[in-house]
Amino acid sequence: MLGQLNNTKLGISGKKLLENQPLLELHKDIIAVVLFSGSSIDEKTAEILAKCEIGNYIGLPNKLQKFIKQRYIWVSRITAGSQSNTLGQITQTLVKKYLEDNLAILSVNIKANGHLPGISHTEANDRPTTFDIVVSKEDKYVGIEVSFQVTTNSVIERKAGQAKSRFEQIEALGYKIGYVLDGAGNFQREKALGTICSYSHCTVAFSLKELDVLCIFLKEYFL
């Protein structure tokens, strides 16, 4: 490989995370570095790459789980130089596709960045509120907000600040609102998460099992 190693050359930058990548020799080299270089017999190398120690926990599931939880909050190089909402956009795309593939409701419409009739930022109803995903059928609507934050920031606080007023508007019109929230950055904001859960009809994490819960909720509402 010529030039500086970066996420683009590894095929793990931005939207490339959604693409299948062949396992190249370069990837194998990087995997070996990440797994074992913290245990290098060269003291300088071991010091620089001290965080690359995950290989020490192979065959030790309890210690591995603890290691991953402790490291999850670290800022990943995969997000460096990217827009702060890249992972959120990818998660939104995957949630939408999962609903399209698994919801199995006739004539249901699933739209990214959609609106709910009558739900607005203003009393004059001239600024429709945009939801990450809108699921609708006839006169029934569900707005779904998606957030995946690796590090703590203000996104989850903003969503929490909007949660009560949105919930009251939606409830008044007989609609529903749900949230898909994940990432250590979100889980660190316990108060904000609690507020969102208080003003949500269905809140799930980003996993197949949790998205199945969301599908069950939607089926109960639409059918």
Image (spheres, rainbow, N blue to C red):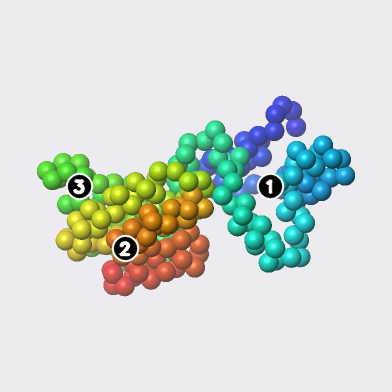
Rate crowding at label 3 as few (under 14), some (14 to 19) or many (20 or more) other CA atoms within 10 Å. some
Q: Quadrant of residue 177?
A: bottom left
* Marking on residue 210: none
Q: Position of residue 33 (x, y in %)?
A: 77, 45
2 or 1: mark nearer the eye:
2
First in sequence, mark 2 or 1: give its number. 1
Considering every residue shown, the one lying at the far right of the view is 41
Considering every residue shown, the one lying at the far left of the view is 124
Report the label total.
3
Q: Is residue 180 visible?
A: yes
Distance CA(mark 1)–CA(mark 3): 45 Å
Per the image, the residue denoted by label 2 is 198
Between residues 78 and 63, which one lies in front from this camera angle?
A: 63
Look at the picture and state if 220 lies above or below 90.
below
Looking at the picture, which amino acid does disc 3 mark? Ser
Q: Is residue 110 visible?
A: no
Q: Position of residue 54 (x, y in %)?
A: 72, 54
